[in-house]
Amino acid sequence: MTDPRRPPEVDRAAASRRAVAARRERANLKKDVAMRVITPQELLRRALSDPASPAGAMRITEFLTSIPAIGEGKRDSILSELAISPVKRLGGLGARQRVDLRAYLDMRWPESQPRGGRSRLVVLAGPTAVGKGTVAAHIKEHHPEIHLSVSATTRPPRPGEVDGEHYYFVDDAEFDRLIAEGELLEHATVHNAHRYGTPRGPIERVLADGRTALLEIDLQGARQVRAAEPSATLVFLLPPSWDELVQRLVGRGTEGDEERARRLRTAKTELASQAEFDFRVVNDDVARAADEVARLAH
Ligand code: 5GP
């Protein structure tokens, strides 16, 4: 006789597969907070908007220790300070606990807030291999009203690249002249190799015409634009997850092991700077991400 209270074999197998998948998702979320791919506040938002999701099912203890800088001692003192039981799951926090936890996170790790008015000078940056170039190319094709800045570079053209369209290809002497004459809005040496810079003139003309300019540049350049034009809108392109970024880097297959390891280390540092940006856009789908960036640029 089968026990009527016991679920059939197939259901139990499916339930155990679901449990394994949910555990894996929770582990990925924790890793992404640890690697700063997402902020703790973002994970909390996901948990509260859907308590049945993997984020919602995460224990408060796991959540806290996934945050860099929180060890077990610190975790326990936060829990007692906020009067939260260690067995609580994020999705099951009480109204008061949610507010207190959020306030604590904002105090310790403030997320940069979008500024009031949006600027028509928009910078798109992000970690290596996240797909900035592809997103920028998509915007250029589908949003012709947005002017995509053409940079000057000392890198030689790749096959198919056209001078004046993809880049202005210049030699070192010409790049030095552009800097000396103040013709670059920002410039940087990228990947320890070549120099890249944004010509100032075209950007000023576009802005004077009341149009929007989009700069797809590296992190150092983004910081210089922020310093020169504090009202610029800075957008950080994120990978959907750390694993996905690794896949994209490995998938390209253009670098050796050592170079790949170096780029992954660089990507980690780059991701850590996302809080400096006004907006974060996840590149889960090129067309979707491009549309989101284009909306921010209007
Ligand atoms: P690539 O050589 O593959 O075209 O570009 C390499 C990197 O240079 C990319 O990360 C791109 O964002 C960055 N880059 C391109 N143009 C500029 C620029 O004008 N200024 C800065 N700072 N970085 C740039």
Image (cartoon, rainbow, N blue to C red):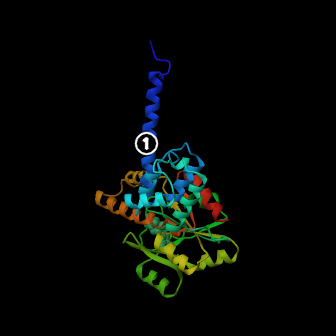
Q: Is residue 210 left or right of residue 223?
A: right
Q: Position of residue 156 (x, y in %)?
A: 41, 69
Residue situated in front as seen by the camera: 79 or 191: 79
Q: Amino acid at mark 1?
A: Arg
The verdict on label 1 being within 8 Å of ligand 1 is no
Residue 17 sits above or below residue 68 on the image:
above
Task: Describe the element under mark 1 as helix, strand or loop.
Answer: helix
From the image, which quarter does the C terminus lie in? bottom right
What residue do we see at 65% from left, 77% from top? 205
Residue situated in front as seen by the camera: 225 or 133: 225
Residue situated in front as seen by the camera: 185 or 62: 62
Q: Position of residue 112 (x, y in %)?
A: 56, 68
Q: Position of residue 68 (x, y in %)?
A: 41, 61
Q: Position of residue 70 (x, y in %)?
A: 41, 61
Toward which corner of the image does residue 111 lie, by quadrant? bottom right
Q: Is residue 47 left or right of residue 212?
A: left
Q: Residues within 10 Å of mark 1 (few under 14, many from 20)?
A: some
The residue at which mark 1 appears reads as: 23
Residue situated in front as seen by the camera: 73 or 18: 73
Residue 170 sits above or below residue 289 on the image:
below
Q: Is residue 62 left or right of residue 164?
A: left
